[in-house]
Amino acid sequence: MSAESTEKLALPSGEEIATLGQGTWHLGEEPARRQQEIAALRLGVDLGMTVVDTAEMYGDGAAEELVGEALRGSREEIFLVSKVLPGHADRLGTVAACENSLRRLRTEQLDLYLLHWRGQWPLEETLAGFTDLMDAGKIRYWGVSNLDVDDMVELTALPGGDAVAADQVLYNLSRRGVEWDLLPWCREAGAAVMAYSPIEQGRLLKAEGLAAVARSLGATLAQVALAWVLAQGAAAIPRSGSPDHIREIRGAVDLHLHREALDALDKAFPPPGGPTPLEML
């Protein structure tokens, strides 16, 4: 038995997106790295990592501006994701925030727009803003980030709430709590799960248990960590500002994790034994 990474993940609409995409947290903040980060994003798209995830929060819009510059001329190849901050997430604020993101991204439409995390505004307000944006053709799908099962149940009970396309959450080998209830719930509801910080912002690369499996497979630690996430049926959006790193992590899609490797990873990073509060970074 083995677990195989897949290249595509289905959304509730049936549309398929790349399982291995690109995150942009902390990109666009250092002028000296700008051209390298642009080159990395463009290479990732060329290699099939066509889901590009960003947010108005990242660098106060700097990451969106970087993405807009990097992806100029290749917009049709990209599944573009951004997020609204909770403080902006009333009905009118959601629309205004999206319009500002579209301007920075130099595009007329987002493929997926997420509530970054739950804040002061009722979910009904944010959902109304998403509906307005869809009606205006400014977003194709909407979803959420950092919402646990109780939040998702509340959301999908609202009129139109069952159209939620995705929940983006912290998920990696060292953060497996979502496997107890949130992942099964999302699978049953048809909502895609997107894993942010799938390598725990690099901290997993110091884990000996992961290193041992990587050695046995002739792969890098990052490739194994990402292949494991993809094998769980989630999409992963690792951040990289380096073309060399992009080339490395793209190999995760082709990596097969055999039963022995999966057992070793479970031993080094045990799955949850009960309900666990949703973790965030």
Image (cartoon, helix red, strand yellow):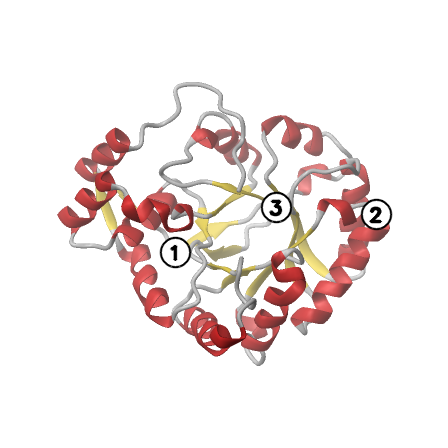
**Residue 126 image point, x, y percent:** 77, 44
Q: Earlier in the sequence, mark 3 or mark 1?
A: 1
Q: Earlier in the sequence, mark 3 or mark 2?
A: 2
Badge number at residue 91? 2
Residue at image point 53% right, 44% down: 192
Q: Does 117 sit above or below residue 31?
A: above
Q: Does 125 sit above or below residue 36?
A: above
Residue at image point 41% right, 33% down: 176
Badge number at residue 102? none
Q: Earlier in the sequence, mark 2 or mark 1?
A: 1
Q: CA distance from mark 2 to mark 1?
A: 35 Å
Identity, as a three-letter code, of the amino acid under mark 3:
Ala
Camera-nearest label, 2 or 1: 2
Q: CA distance from mark 3 to mark 1?
A: 18 Å
* Quarter residue 82 falls in: bottom right
Badge number at residue 165? 3
Q: Which one is in front, 251 or 60?
A: 60
Q: Does 275 sit above or below residue 119?
A: above
Q: CA distance from mark 3 to mark 2?
A: 19 Å
Camera-nearest label, 3 or 2: 2
The reply, left or right, for residue 109 in relation to residue 21 is right
Task: Residue under label 1, please give it.
Answer: 7
**Local crowd at mark 1 within 10 Å, few (<14), some, or many (≥20)?**
some
Mark 3 element type: loop
**Residue 257 image point, x, y percent:** 24, 44
Mark 1 element type: loop
Residue 43 seen = yes
Quarter of the image with the N terminus is: top left
